[in-house]
Image (tube, grey):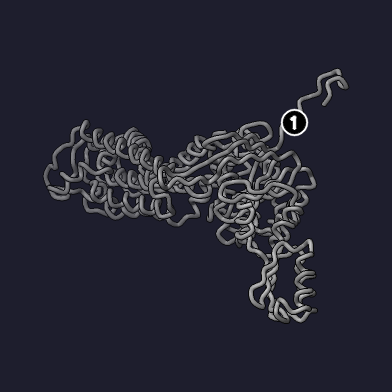
Amino acid sequence: MLFTPTFFRVEVTRQFRNPYTLVFTLGMPIAMYLLFGANAAYATASAGNGNVAFYVMASMATFGTATAMTSLCALAASEVGQGWGRQIALTPLSIAGYTVVKLAVALAFSAISTACVFLVGAVTGARADSPWHWLSVAGIVLAGGLVFGLFGLGAGLALNSDSASAFASIAITLFGFVGNVFMPLSGTMLTIAHFTPMYGYAALARWPITEGALVTAGTGPGGDDALWLVLLNVLAWALLFGALVRYGVLRSRRRR
Amino acid sequence: MDPNERPSRPPAPPAPALEITGVTRQFGTGDSLVRAVSGVDIVIERGEVVALLGPNGAGKTTLLDMVLGLSDPDEGSIRVLGESPRRAVAAGALSAVLQTGGLLADLTVLETVQVIASFHSALGRVPEVIERADLTGVERRKVSKCSGGEQQRVKFALALLPDPDVLVLDEPTAGMDVTARRRFWDAMRQDASAGRTIVFATHYLEEAEQFARRTVVMNHGRVVADGDTATLRASLGGRTLSARLPGAPTAPNTAALLDGLRADVATAELEVDGQRVRIRSANSDAVASQLLAAGATELEIAAPTLETAFTALTEA
């Protein structure tokens, strides 16, 4: 058995009851967008194929999605490591079925988070040149979020405790700051940022607007990123997180 | 069966509920190698109610995990109703109440039961199972707000969902108070009389006595006794009495008393140390009254701990 609507429904309701999930995946991205995007003095300035408000909105959507994917996948993994996995092993549901439902829940939450940020963006002045820009950004946000699903899964398997999920979402906030997601970085910080996990993901999500151009805090041009560099960052971190999952699987197997 | 009496071939007898053959499971390697289960053979027929008794660390949970297909034996095989444990679980023929833990704290009782029911395609059985497990009235409560006994009942409800032929209970009453324990076993008794095969692990001798006709005793990963619970109880149930004799052991009255006690078939052991006597007997009440009637003082009666009883069984 792969999918049961009851399991999906209960899991979604359960996350809506979880204040932690609500604050980090829905509240924070919107608050950050309002703070750095909609209410910023440069909100209506151009960022390429859209305005700065849109640019910030896209960044915050990556943050919300990365947090949702990370925390929900970490939770899924640590639950299996604890007694709930044994309970599920006593039913016809396969581990693949469990993963499919949990991934669907994480994606659903990511989609809800992205939709909320976009909705707030649309009513507070985020503008892009065409509806296609909105759709392509949303698509990249959700697809790229899968990389952070790997991160959450790996963290949950390796730590195997209730704190895994909290740890992983705090890590995402940190990655956001050093990854040029919240505020435009410059100089050495920007150079370092290129190597951090959120950098490639956020840059890729903003690509339809910026086409690689960097937005800086100061005035004047901030330079350009090459597409291959951004993709390389995403790919490298996907591989690293994949290795973390592998380590986590081995570790949890040894514990048994 | 004599084939001459039956010209037509008789149908193959149904596979036993549980067939454990030469099962061994070890953890670790080298010096830290631990044989949790070592060469266990048990056959349980359909409809039997069997207690698996043993102290902590005897290998009960490791064995039951393999019976449920949660882990695999290193050696030997396990068949449940003639199939592999995982197939029996997938078919809903085998289910279990696991030891404490194993529920999601932030789900309600009803949500927990519904989720597991959906995996078994048994959503229709939810109301019935809630009632059977005595959970009516707490359905909307979060699992984290449930008492230990209520959480065990939730797990009991989950185990009932597939309507299994074989039910495995791993220390099902852990964390329950006396009343909850009695109610739990009352519910189980109904199930047993309905023909379900029940195997339960416990370290309470009373639970085995009251509920199982057959008891398998494990210690250090091995089966040290397997048989009728009543018989086993007699061998485990002796008590040790110790008392100060009314006079020196050689004094006529005292010597007669000691001779009488030695002759008693219920006496398993009798030791005299100075003026103190130590007696192990299956009939402790009678021995106590004899001792007191003869003027013995400072009488002490001790039930054997299971640990010592198991040690005796292993060494026998």
Mark 1 element type: loop
Count of numbered labels shown in the rendering: 1
Which residue occupies the foreground of this view, B300 or B254?
Answer: B254
Determine if residue A115 is in view: no
Residue in the picture at 64% in, 73% down: B273
Instruction: Sort mark 1 into few (<14), some (14-19) or many (20+) by Cα contacts within 10 Å.
Output: few
Q: Position of residue A46 (x, y in %)?
A: 21, 42
Residue A13: x and y, percent?
53, 49
Q: Which residue lies at the image location 38% right of the left edge and 45% below the top edge?
A: A152
Viewer-closest of B284 and B70: B284
The extreme right residue here reads: B5
Kind of residue at disc 1: Pro
Residue labelled with disc 1: B14
**Farthest residue in the top direction?**
B7
Tell me: B148 left or right of B43: left
Residue A153 vs B5, above or below: the answer is below
The chain identifier of the residue carrying mark 1 reads B
Q: Please identify the quadrant where the N terminus of chain A is shown.
A: top right
Q: Quadrant of residue A129?
A: top left
Where is residue B290 drawn, in percent x and y?
79, 74
